[in-house]
Image (cartoon, helix red, strand yellow):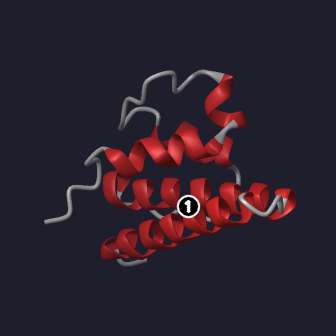
């Protein structure tokens, strides 16, 4: 897995987030939930590649969070609300410069 692939994963995560937001307006709840999960999973995989130099094949958000826990500090990261509302997490990482594109 190329170290630079983190950008691909992050772009896909942001695209999934945008699609989830658009579908939310139409009440497509199951799709919103699915795409929200996908967005968070892809963002965490991007973070693992960028900060840890590894690609994780898991689909478990809990496992991915455990993997990055020592690399980045996110407010209320241990709070269940971050797991129950994945848009909070993705919204947070899209606002902060943790990927530092250079």
Q: Residue 55's spot in the image, x, y percent? A: 49, 65
Query: Where 74 falls versus 44 (above or below)?
Result: above
Residue 22 visible here: yes
Residue 38 visible here: no
Q: Nearer the viewer, residue 8 or 33?
A: 33
Quadrant location of the C terminus in the rendered image: bottom left
Give the residue number, with chain letter if any, for mark 1: 56
Q: Nearer the viewer, residue 6 or 58?
A: 6
Task: Write the residue at 68% across / 25% down.
Answer: 80
Horizontal placement of 94 versus 44: left or right? left
Query: Where 40 falls versus 46 (above or below)?
Result: above
Quadrant location of the N terminus in the rendered image: bottom left
The extreme left residue here reads 102
Query: Where 60 falls versus 75 (above or below)?
Result: below
Q: How many numbered tags mark residues here?
A: 1
Secondary structure of residue under mark 1: loop
Q: Badge 1 local density, few (<14 within 10 Å), some, or many (20+)? A: some
Task: Write the residue at 43% across / 24% down.
Answer: 75
Q: Residue 59's spot in the image, x, y percent? A: 70, 59
Task: Write the residue at 69% across / 55% down.
Answer: 37
Q: Residue 50's spot in the image, x, y percent? A: 33, 59
The picture quadrant where one finds residue 35 is bottom right
Q: Residue 23's spot in the image, x, y percent? A: 72, 65
The picture quadrant where one finds residue 30 is bottom right
Task: Write the residue at 51% across / 49% down.
Answer: 90
Q: Nearer the viewer, residue 41 or 68?
A: 41
């Amino acid at each position: 897995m190329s170290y630079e692939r983190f950008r691909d994963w992050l772009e896909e995560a942001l695209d999934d987030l945008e699609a989830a937001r658009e579908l939310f307006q139409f009440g497509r709840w199951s799709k919103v939930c699915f795409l929200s999960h996908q967005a968070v999973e892809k963002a965490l995989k991007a973070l693992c590649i960028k900060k840890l130099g590894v690609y994780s094949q898991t689909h478990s958000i809990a496992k991915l969070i455990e993997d990055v826990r020592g690399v980045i500090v996110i407010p209320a990261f241990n709070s269940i609300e971050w797991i129950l509302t994945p848009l909070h997490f993705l919204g947070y990482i899209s606002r902060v410069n943790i990927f530092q594109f250079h």
